[in-house]
Image (tube, rainbow, N blue to C red):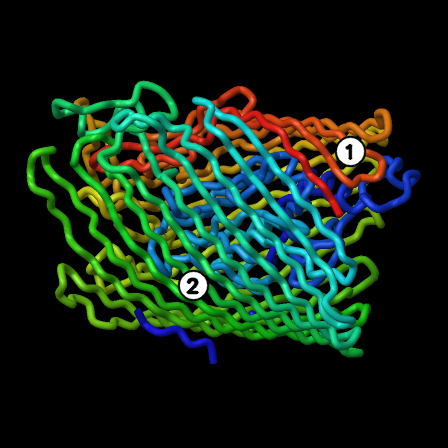
Amino acid sequence: MKELQINLFVTAAAVLAQSLVPSVALAQDTTAEQPKDEQASTGIEDIVVTATRREARLQQVPVAVTALGADALQSADVSTVRTLTQLVPGFVGSRNMGVFQPVVRGVGSTGISIGDEPNIATYIDGVYQPESAANWIDLVEVERVEVLRGPQGTTFGRNATGGLINVITPDPSFDFRGKASLRVGRMRREAGDYDARLYVTGPISEKAAIDLSGLFRKNDGYIDDLVRGGTLGDQRVIDLRSKFLFKPADNFKVVLTGEFFDQKSTSNSPQPVDGNTVARRFPGAILPTGAWQASLTDVPRLDLRRWTFALHTKLELDDFNIETTSGFMNLRWNQITDSDASNLRLGNFPAIFRSESGSQEIKLSSANPGPLQWLVGGYFYQFGGSAFLQPWTAPSPTAGLSGPTLEPDLGGRSFAGFADITYEAVPGLFVNLGGRYTTEKREFSQTLNGSLVVNNVHRSFNKFNYKIGVRYEIDDKTNVYASWSTAFKSGVFNMASTRNIPVEPEEIKAAEFGLKSDPFDWFRANLAIYYYDYTNLQLQSKDSAGSGYILQNAANAEIYGGELETTIVPTAGLKLRAALAYTHAQYKDFPLAQGFFPQADGGNTVVTLDASGFVMTRAPKWSGNVGFEWGHDLGAGRMALNGNVSFSSRLYYDFANNFSQKPYTLSNASLSWTPENENWKVAVWATNLTNEKVFQTMRPGPLSNDGFYEQPRKIGATFEVKF
């Protein structure tokens, strides 16, 4: 593995505005320390976000943003970024075994290769997180999570074709405080679910402070192992994170962050959907007959270890601010995944992945209020990675195994410069212009069965992206905006291939129009509509040979739709929210798509077909959520009841629209009590109340169409103490 040396109609526009969910939740968060009479107000409070790389009021940002506070995430049982599906309209937290593959408005990557970064970017405290396998981010102690919908190709830039997830954690405090919590739950087969968290922060001198957050999460297996007995699907996670804050002057600060994440799991335990596996052709096959069952040749493995470091500095001067952000990641990832989802030895994909990446950004921004606001910056990114892959198949359980041994080595670097200005041309009318130029170089080598077959092939990609937008304040409670923006994702090599030519970059052009309005203190409505011209989509699917994967460009696609979010606070103790998203997403020109068609005796026939006009994968036409938060003083404390219901129409998982998850609904609820001093809290909760059987993903291939379900109904209790 190569050594890694660490020596910029508009960007967001708005399809929606902020999710009601966020507004409601964050309103609760920010009022926690306000006087009782202020908490009794029925007004919907605004929050400050960094969706445009500078702090601004959410309702004035011409970007479709959902911003969720810690309380909202906890009450909806959103413990990782993947489960944001339940609170963010138009968002699908898809996965392929150990790889997180988020989708926003129908835009999302299917790649699993090292160096094939998702086109929905993930950031933690401004640091880009490149590897999709490493983005199982546990939300231990967060200030908020922002989900931006729509291309972010200028100010955020890197691989934000469809949007991004921005996780913001609090800086250490000069006031000592902390909290600890313990969650205990139960699923089917009495499978336990345990979650212990600790957060402590305080000063170590007059100019320095530190914090420490820790997480231990474990769930017992809830998937019946039909071969060996017992269960699969267990997971153990340890996450330790610390920040060190040094503030030698009021206008200057340095924040150093370090994190260690370790996971051991058998959650990659697929089962054939409707019994579709080639194992049906042979005697001795054991097939699941219900949800949450698996019959696999070997015990699966999904182990991951990640080290990350970040350094952030900020200097505030009279006329402008200077910020720098450095990041580094080291990832090790091992997997054993059954390719035919059966107990017979017909296919498997063992693999070991290693990668390192680093980034450096510097940004200057205007500091004074006025009609002209500006931001300029530069960005550098470099990565290196390697893998050991042994995808194999067998024509029958008794035949010899066949398959290549691949040892790819990938690397690359990227430079970008960016600028963004907003000018108030006349009172209430803001014009926004942004641009980013990126030059990127990628390298690829491949060893096949011990022989070097691709020797250090290089390919460069250059692109200028831009945005144009306007925002008009009709009055102090209503904004309208329109934008035109572009974004791209660099071409990439397929690590599971001996092909020395990468797929071409994918590009998107987006038009958006939106409205954000607070017509009454107790009512908020945000509406946005959009249109995408999406070309050269990078799409991955199972190889016709069996266990491996192919990566190809689809010619283009057309996506349009809209989102509506509302928040209502009819009384001081009740907050209601609802969100609805409509997405029309079709392949416009896809003549060489890989299609899988079920065979009567199991498995699928692989054909090349014209998928033009077919619905894009993982793009439900309708999705949304509704929820409420109700609180009432009871005895010497306060009782709170929370509920959330999310829904989705049918999702397709293949280009030919043969395999899909039918429409579904997921519901969660919690009941808590907090004493007047707010020093502790106790709660009971339930997730997936109706025990809905919902596939997290499906993997159509020649050997099977398999998948695995979301967790079954889970009931438990939480105790939290603050100090």
Q: Residue at x 79, y 35 (%)?
A: 523
* Amino acid on which disc 2 is placed: Asn
Instruction: Measure how far apart labels 2 and 1 are at the Cα level.
Output: 41 Å
Q: Which mark is residue 674?
A: 1
| Residue 260 locus on image (x, y percent) | 50, 57
Query: Looking at this view, is 63 or 469 the one in front?
Result: 63
* Amino acid on which disc 1 is placed: Thr
- Which quadrant of the view contains residue 290? top left
Q: Residue at x 78, y 41 (%)?
A: 679
Q: Which residue position holds label 2?
A: 330
* Residue 624 higher or lower than 61, as above or below: above
| Residue 179 locus on image (x, y percent) | 70, 47
Q: Is label 1 in a helix, a strand or a loop?
A: strand
Query: Looking at this view, is 423 or 61 the one in front?
Result: 61
Placement of the N terminus among the 4 image quadrants: bottom left
Q: Residue at x 33, y 30 (%)?
A: 659
Q: Residue furthest bottom?
A: 7
Q: Residue at x 52, y 55 (%)?
A: 122
Left/right placement of residue 120 relative to residue 596 reads: right
Other residues around mark 2 within 10 Å, as few (<14) / some (14–19) / many (≥20):
some
